[in-house]
Image (cartoon, helix red, strand yellow):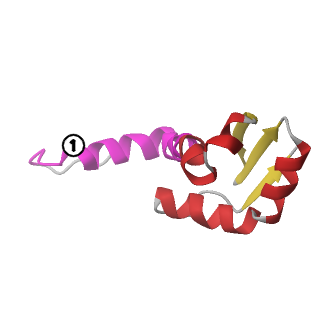
């Protein structure tokens, strides 16, 4: 971590350096994507989502309804854009439904 000699770093700068140093930024972005899922897809789809996780810039979504899975599959590129926009940066490239 690089600090200015006069120790006048903002708290935000220090936290960003800490997160980057320990590799937490990517993990926090993944959590933010998962937490945004219900807002983006709505309550009905969220209720039928049994698991979500991010790995290698892919959001894996497990649903308990094949009908809803197919509906979301058709909208996957739009969902990727909406989720990334919600976070304010590109976190995921693709959504994998199962």
Q: Residue at x 27, y 44 (%)?
A: 14
Please rate how many residues cluster around mark 1, counting C-alpha atoms within 10 Å: few if below 14, some from 14 to 19, many from 20: few
Furthest residue in direction top, as rendered: 50
Q: Which residue is mark 1?
A: 11
Name the spot of residue 44 as percent of width and height, x first.
68, 42
Name the spot of residue 17 as percent of width and height, x first.
36, 46
Q: Nearer the viewer, residue 55 or 48?
A: 48
Q: Quadrant of residue 34?
A: top right
Q: Residue at x 55, y 39 (%)?
A: 31
Q: Main secondary structure of the magenta part?
A: helix
Q: Residue at x 82, y 57 (%)?
A: 71
| Bounds of the magenta segment | 6-33
Q: Nearer the viewer, residue 19 or 2?
A: 19
**In the drawing, does residue 34 fall left or right of residue 58?**
left
**In the drawing, does residue 42 fall left or right of residue 57?**
left
Vertical placement of residue 84 versus 56, above or below: below
Q: Nearer the viewer, residue 73 or 67?
A: 67
Name the spot of residue 98 as percent of width and height, x first.
88, 43
**In the drawing, does residue 9 fall left or right of residue 22?**
left
Name the spot of residue 46 as percent of width and height, x first.
67, 40
């Amino acid at each position: 971590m690089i600090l200015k000699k006069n120790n006048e770093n903002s708290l935000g700068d220090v936290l960003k350096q800490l997160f980057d140093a320990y590799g937490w930024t990517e993990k926090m972005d993944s959590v933010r994507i998962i937490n945004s899922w219900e807002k983006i897809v709505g309550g009905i789809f969220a209720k039928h989502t049994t698991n979500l996780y991010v790995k290698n810039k892919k959001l894996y979504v497990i649903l308990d309804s094949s009908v809803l899975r197919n509906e979301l599959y058709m909208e996957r590129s739009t969902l990727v854009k909406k989720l990334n926009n919600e976070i304010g940066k590109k976190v995921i490239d693709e959504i994998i439904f199962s």
